[in-house]
Image (tube, grey):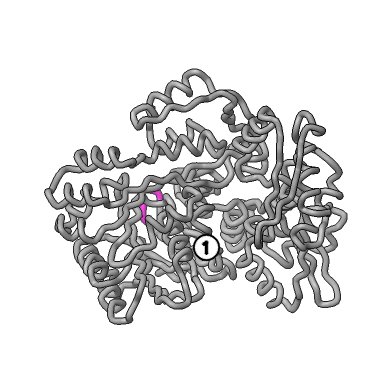
Amino acid sequence: MTLVELTEMIVKSLVSDPDSISVKEFPNDDEIIIEVIVKEEDINRALDYQKEHPSKKVGDILYELHIGNPNALIAAIADILGEKPMLLGSADIKINIADYLPLDIARKNKAIPFETGAGKIKVCFSNTANQRMLENMRLLFLNKGLIMERYITFDSIIDEILTSMEIASTETIDVNADISELVNSIIKNGMEKRASDIHIEPEENSIRVRYRIDGELVTAATIEKDKQAQLIGRLKAISNMHQEKQESQDGRILLYSDYNIRVSSQKNVYGEKFVLRLLKKNADVQQIFELGFPNDPELVKKCFNKKNSIVLIAAPTGEGKTTTLYSIIDFLNKPEINVTTIEDPVEIRIPGLNQIEVDARATFSDSLRTVLRQDPDIILVGEIRDRETAEIAMQAGQTGHYVLSTIHTIDSIEVITRLRKIGVSDYDIASTLATSLSQRLVRRVCPKCAVKREYTEEEKNIINGIAKKYGVEYDFTGKYTYDTVGCQYCNNSGFYGRIGIFEILNMTEDVKELVIKGESSLEIRKKAMEEGYKPLVMDGFNKILNGYTTLKELNSKLVIY
């Protein structure tokens, strides 16, 4: 089947009058131009569907809508892509997937290994366009002594199989197990449920275990009070803490091959509370567009591909600043440049980067001074915490380096106020700060249980009431939002995963002039809005209207009504 034939088949299956369409092919140097003539009503229908499912490929849409023969469709798609087709079913899976590929990696890469033999492993993908991902997968299996053989299938097939496996494999906390097994089940269960943190909290009559999942704390278990001393002793033993001390301590658990676990203890009125931060050792760096940043490479280059400057990412703790930093570095990283990072701790190890971990002997400012003598092109500083670090970072930006860092403020404009408060001069801010980016993480609606509905009049009024302040008014005709229900897949939360909402302040000449004059953040904000600045809430509305999240979830982050 040719590309024209496939295009014709797809279009005819979607339009109201298949006989009315015309598909023609025109060679154009190294390109092929395909002209498709359809009725305006069908164009509008297609656009409406694309707005509801912005990330779905056409083949997946056809499969999910049961349009055409799925075997013929996947065969045609595979032929175009130069891949082997596979309409993967449970009967085709001849191995235990988790023995060859961790389920979280399988989910992230939309990949399912399903058969081995003769030194080969057959792997089904829903997308083979990401060459870096394919190479990483090839090397992963090669390390196991297996040569990867690629197949292509539909995205929803991959999701269905992985979801059923995740539900079946989820660990449970056995509160009656011996102390060693109890601690292990608490940690393993947290990993399975995608927890970023585990809270173990002594109360008056019991011990409460909670997981932070997608930014929210949920109770996982309640343990009998008489196990408290043993539980604390075990946690201190495996995290290399002093057994007798009841003051605050920090430690690490290194018992799990895929995770580094940072441990913090703090005495309270009922004993000692522990918080375990789960950090994957070999987590893949997400592309900036996967995080929710506008899918515009030119905008990324405009914001971040700069020299002799500093870029700051602003957000409260736990809102994904470090993840965004990594994605920017990954976007900019090239063999011909020297990238050095200073972090506390190094959360993701990236090949080709010089990564330095801050400890008690070397602060951010100490490490930054040393790094400047190592001929760096790009410097990532985990956080601007004080005047000394800020001034050195500014000096680095002024002397030919490109510096990326984070800072704790409520939005991108208040970055300027924060820098002023820690003692950075207006001149240094104006001459060196190139871009400040602010972000929040909002939960995504669960794709398995969310229920589509029309917007209420109250919701429309809230959204447009705020949007009009920034010169925007939305038309809700044909637009839908979602009610969150909850299911086994999302731990009954109604949400699965998170996506970023962003605002960007580029330091234009007019904004710089206001900074040098010492003008307030209010005046700077007014000028930025004249030049097109849009606050976090506007990107939040875009995420709502594209079906990623809900108005209620956005309000929980920004308190807009």
Q: Using the image as rendered, state which of residue 197 and residue 380 is in the foreground.
A: 380
The kind of residue on which mark 1 rests is: Val
The answer to if 121 sits in the magenta stretch is no
Q: Using the image as rendered, state which of residue 260 and residue 202 is in the foreground.
A: 260
Task: Residue at 33%, 41% (x, y): give it.
Answer: 532
**Secondary structure type for disc 1:** loop
Which quarter shows the N terminus? bottom right
Task: Residue at 52%, 20% (x, y): give it.
Answer: 456
Task: List x then y, in percent, for residue 559.
Answer: 38, 33
468 vs 196, left or right, is left
**Is residue 77 placed above or below 38 in the rendered structure?**
below
Task: Residue at 33%, 61% (x, y): give it.
Answer: 405
Task: Residue at 19%, 62% (x, y): give it.
Answer: 387
Which quarter shows the C terminus? top left
Q: Do we see residue 130 in this rendering?
A: yes
- Image quadrant in which you'd find residue 16: top right
Residues packed near mark 1 inside 10 Å, few (<14), some (14 to 19) or many (20 plus) = some
Task: List x then y, in percent, for residue 437.
Answer: 35, 51
Task: List x then y, in percent, for residue 443.
Answer: 52, 42
User: What's the magenta bit mostly, secondary-structure-wise?
Assistant: strand
Magenta residue span? 266-270
559 vs 37, left or right, is left
Tag count in the figure? 1
The residue beneath circle 1 is 285
Q: Do we see residue 209 in this rendering?
A: no
Task: List x then y, in percent, for residue 170.
Answer: 68, 52
**Is residue 529 placed above or below 364 in the rendered structure?**
above
